[in-house]
Image (cartoon, helix red, strand yellow):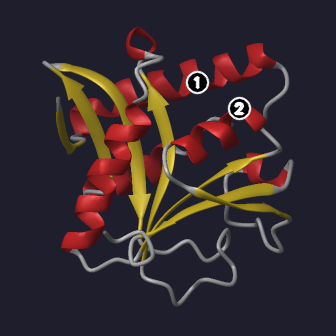
Amino acid sequence: MTIKNVTPLDIDKIFTFYTIASNYQKEKKTVIVWPEFNREMVETEIAENRQFKLLINTEVACVWAVTFSDVQIWEDSKEDSALYIHRIAVNPNFRGNNYIDKIIAWAKEFALEKDIQFIRLDTLGENLGLIKHYRNAGFDFLGLFNLKDTSNLPDHYKLAPVCLFEIDLLKNKV
């Protein structure tokens, strides 16, 4: 297993994974479905080295993006030193392998190298399965929140309250 930055050559694969994830969400019928994401946004993330891929041998098992600020979602936490994880999308050939644990181990190491205190992520709606999944991965579930301003966020953020999750690396330091 290897974790690397995504390259521009990976962009079509990323969007394929996003489409597969959206279709899977549609099939579940009880969760918020990802919209079609803006290609330019993903190109910017790639150029800024904020898109990552987890490889098993040479095959991409999953992808995700990170940011270091997320004011519209984490409205009251803009001063915090945090790594925000977004859009984890898994290759269907690798689904069920609990890659969230690998991503979190990587995120902890990445955050500690950069002196970052929090690892955070969000999801939409009261998706009890995903809430349990993220809690089992070590995140504290902070609750459901209605966002005040979704104007610059992807469309699905307008559909339901957001679930916020975090790992406080100072609190959890051994």
> In the rendering, which numbered label is found on residue 128?
none
Res. 133 visible in picture: yes
Q: Is residue 156 placed above or below 95 in the rendered structure? A: below
Q: Which residue is found at the position 35% from the left and 44% from the top?
A: 103
Q: Mark 2 = which residue?
A: 129
The crowding category of the residue bearing disc 2, from other C-alpha atoms within 10 Å (few below 14, some 14 to 19, many at least 20), is few
For numbered disc 1, what is the local secondary structure? helix
Q: Is residue 129 left or right of residue 13?
A: right
Between disc 2 and disc 1, whose residue precedes?
1
Specify the quadrant of the image occupied by residue 170. bottom left
Specify the quadrant of the image occupied by residue 153. bottom right
Relative depth, front residue between 146 and 111: 111
Does the residue at mark 2 contact the one at mark 1 (Cβ under 8 Å)?
A: no
**Residue type of the residue flagged with mark 1:** Ala
For numbered disc 2, what is the local secondary structure? helix
**Residue type of the residue flagged with mark 2:** Gly
Q: Which residue is found at the position 59% from the left and 47% from the top?
A: 135
Where's residue 6, x and y in %? 25, 41
Where's residue 119, x and y in %? 45, 64
Where's residue 44, x and y in %? 37, 57
Q: Is residue 121 left or right of residue 119?
A: right
Single out the residue that lies furthest toward the front.
Answer: 174
Q: Mark 1 = which residue?
A: 21
Q: Is residue 31 left or right of residue 78?
A: right
The crowding category of the residue bearing disc 1, from other C-alpha atoms within 10 Å (few below 14, some 14 to 19, many at least 20), is many
Relative depth, front residue between 118 and 45: 118
Closer to viewer: mark 2 or mark 1: 2
Res. 48 visible in picture: no
